[in-house]
Image: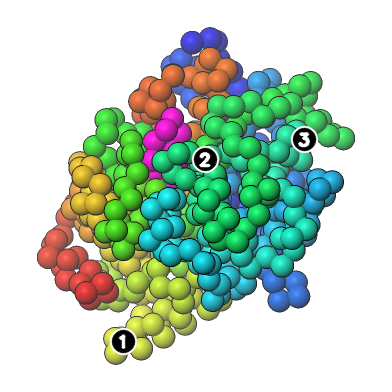
Amino acid sequence: MSGPVTVAAVDLGASSGRVMAGRVSDASVMLREVHRFGNEPVSAGGTLYWDILRLLASVRHGLELAARQFPLASAGIDSWGVDYGLLDETGALLGNPVHYRDARTDGIRIPVPASDLYAVTGIQHLPFNTIYQLAATPVLRHARTMLLIPDLLAYWLTGEAGAEITNASTTSLFDVRAQAWAIGLIQQAGLPPRIFPPLRRPGDVIGPITGPNGVGSGLPLIAVGSHDTASAVVGVPADGPGFAYISSGTWSLAGVELDTPVLTEASRAANFTNETGVDGTVRYLRNVMGLWLLQESLRGWPDASLESLLGEAARLPSLRFVVDPDDPVFLPPGDMPGRIAAWLDARGEAAPDGPAETVRCILDSLALAYRRAITQAQALSGRHADVVHIVGGGSRNALLCQLTADAAGLPVVAGPAEATCFGNVLVQARVLGAAPGDLAGMRALIRSAEPLRAFSPAGSAADWAAAEARIWP
């Protein structure tokens, strides 16, 4: 490997974004936050949009700050999946990208049987998948190019249009075996093949960053695992293949890493997804609603302290209140505690009394959903897990980590919280010759550099099995 390098990781989440500087050498990898900014959706005319131009300005500003502070060698962008912008034939944006939580896909159908769709794409059914969003888009006939969010930002930064495969694989329009756009399926769905740009892979150099306030002479933008979970899984500090992972944030992605997709009818019925990972891997997982339930609840308790609530919740009895966190009723913004209470009331069960009980309900329910996803992922894929790695923001939540160990009956290793940025940085550094050449080497580097916490399973496995049967009989 070459000497140390410093690169910039742009990591965009559903509520905030940040630019991190990462320094990589043969013995260490270190991150420093340079710029953090909000990413709040905007409701206008009954539609929920992303404020994409403000997001672009924030990304540019963050890169400029990073370039002033560090000798940057490159930059890379990751973000959430499925959402996109449409460009016309001149390259102009046809309206702000619509937020995946918008209701425009309610009731949308496509003329492709669900079994045929899964056999090609391997993607779990979610009502906001890109295929349904495109089917609900009235301006589609005017579009020349569709760019997913990180690719749209990359286009504005470099002038180069393309689609990075880890994010393209989330669209339900990508052939997971051929690793190419599923043109036949696209045509069958009634969508125009012309809008799908050339594909690129993690490690491809997109081009130099340009613009009125450039961030340095010829700073290259490198394609990383541009779906944030793809970068997060690179950042899982696993030692060997026998692991399950949970990338825990607003959404939780729980599953295992495979070499080939699982496209069986049983896998489709269980609503598992086969997303492309870095280095030809498959992220075999299920999306779980995640800490969204807690985040939305906290918005309704403006004077509450999360730390205090978690302390109170830890002292409460387990599994008294549990819900299915993936019920579509919990997807939109709004009164989350009220919806949790209504969900339980509709089933003749008692509801939580106050914030602490609601927090305990949410965390017990998430741990239960993680247990179910990890158990099924192993059974459907044949890949055994000896340990569960929790990365992302949820790895800081000790109560959630302990409950996950208890529920899954497996040891949990928590951290790093910044797994996505580590994955983003290391893929760039590998291109520059400063990081190990394979996933095992990159993960070993993270293990040596980051403090990790271990949680051993405790409590009654029978109690968790009974609670799971209450929710998913």
Residue at the right extreme of this rendering: 212
Q: SS at mark 2?
A: strand
Q: Report the residue marked by disc 2.
A: 180
How was this image coloured? rainbow
Q: Is residue 174 magenta?
A: no
Please tell me how crowded label 2 is: few (under 14), some (14-19), or many (20+) other residues with Cα within 10 Å: some
Tell me where the magenta segment starts and ends, as one range. 275-283
Q: Name the residue nearer the viewer: 129 or 347.
A: 129
**Which amino acid type is shown beneath numbered disc 1?**
Arg
Q: SS at mark 1?
A: loop
For the point 76% across and 75% down, the residue is: 45
Is residue 319 placed above or below 175 in the rendered structure?
below
Q: Earlier in the sequence, mark 1 or mark 3?
A: 3
Disc 2/disc 3 C-alpha distance (Å): 22 Å
Is residue 101 placed above or below 421 in the rendered structure?
below
Is residue 421 placed above or below 335 in the rendered structure?
above
Q: Earlier in the sequence, mark 1 or mark 2?
A: 2
Residue 268 visible in the current orientation: yes
Residue 81's tag is: none
Q: Name the residue nearer the viewer: 69 or 209.
A: 209
Disc 1/disc 2 C-alpha distance (Å): 45 Å
Q: Name the residue nearer the viewer: 166 or 178.
A: 178
Q: Report the residue marked by disc 3.
A: 159
Residue at the top extreme of this rendering: 2
Q: Report the residue marked by disc 1.
A: 347
Mark 1 and mark 3 residues within 8 Å of each other at the beta carbon:
no
For residue 286, which quarter of the picture? bottom left
